[in-house]
Image: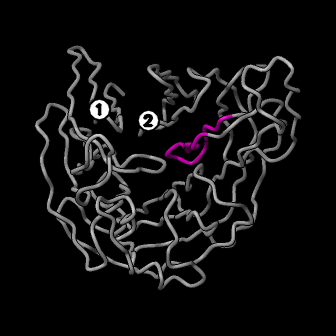
Amino acid sequence: MRDFFVFDSINGLAIVRTGPKPSTTRFQGRITGPLGKPPFDWLRTSSAVLGVRQNTAKPSGFALGPLQPYLFPVNGPARQLPKLANAAGPLDELYWMGESGIAIAAFGTKGFLYKPEHDDPHPTLAFVDALNGKVLQAAAIASIPDLPTKSRVGAISHSMNAKGIITALIAFQSNRWVVWTQGKAPRILQLGTKYVHQFTVTPNGRDVLVMKNLSASGATCELNPNCPPPTPQTGPIAELRSLSTGNIIWSLRGTAREFSGSDVPAISPDGRYALISMPREKHRSTTALISMASGKIIQQIPRPSTSGCTVGFSRDGRKAWISGETTVYIFDIAK
């Protein structure tokens, strides 16, 4: 865990090496209107970052063309990958899967963010091999039962089995959840919960860990000294649910005494542990290491930032990390 990358929607991508010879490689460029996680991820060999570039208007940031997949080596220069094309429209979204160049692409979904705007009559999702410019399997959003045609993707999480087959859970902003396994048709899943960005599919592809965004309620008055204190709320902090039935396997409950939001959780590669954000209490923000078998809290760890953080595990599962603003905490996992 010596290398990191950071993407800024204005200044572009920076890859930082922290070994014996530290260095920073920067790649300029912005992209239009990303929701949730930006479209960048490590290549499995850690020799490069999978990502995109886009021609955008200055200073507004409106799209002047589609996304273009790129490979960003840790020592540069950037390498353009083959173009991805579909009759539904331009490549507007890309969600990397499995660090191998496989991704879910969205074609013809963001015409309203172009200058000039254009209509997208047939928005389409597809499994793609972005390293080789191939569309592997496509599904028009209108072809998915009970999903409104104009539904927009909010977030995606995935798992990959031993044969390299990907199962993805897609949260649409229309409060619909869709499970899509390569080679099969996408299907609606009833999760009994409203749409959220913050969820992660388990490594075995059977379940999903969903954050519930538990928060205190009440008025927000900025610096008004007469503002009444938040009203504490008790309820589920996180739930583990089955991807086949949507049923709850376990639920971790607690009380939020201040206004809070949830980060995207992370699950260790062996599926034993998870890192989740906890509701704020007494101006203190923590991330909890929990057991995936029961949801039991093992340890709470102070966070490097009171705002949103990113969490994860090393590929061997022996280390965990929490990143916030300009700080990264790295921890050993006791076996």
Indicate which label's residue lies in the foreground, 2 or 1: 1
For disc 2, the marked residue is: 314
Residue 255, quarter of the rendered image: top right
- N-terminal of the two: label 2 or label 1? 1
Q: Residue furthest top?
A: 20
Which residue is rendered at x = 88% and y = 27% of the image? Answer: 228
Which residue in the protein does label 1 denote? 11
* 186 on left or right of 241: left
Colour option used:
one colour
Q: Is residue 284 above or below residue 93?
A: above
Q: On the rendered image, what quadrant is the N terminus found in?
A: top left
Q: Is residue 194 left or right of residue 256?
A: left
Query: Which region is colored magenta?
Result: 263-277
Tell me residue 254's x, y (percent): 83, 38
Few, some or many residues within 10 Å of mark 1 (<14, 14–19, 20+): few
Residue 50 placement (x, y as % from top left): 26, 47
Q: Quadrant of the C terminus?
A: top right
Disc 2 marks a residue whose amino acid type is Ser
Q: How many numbered discs?
A: 2
- 3D distance between C-alphas at marks 2 and 1: 27 Å
Q: Check the image and report above or below for 202 versus 321.
A: below
Q: Residue type at mark 1?
A: Asn
Residue found 68% across the figure and 41% down from its top: 291
Whether residue 284 sits left or right of residue 176 in the image: it is right
Of residues 118 and 27, which is closer to you in this image? 118
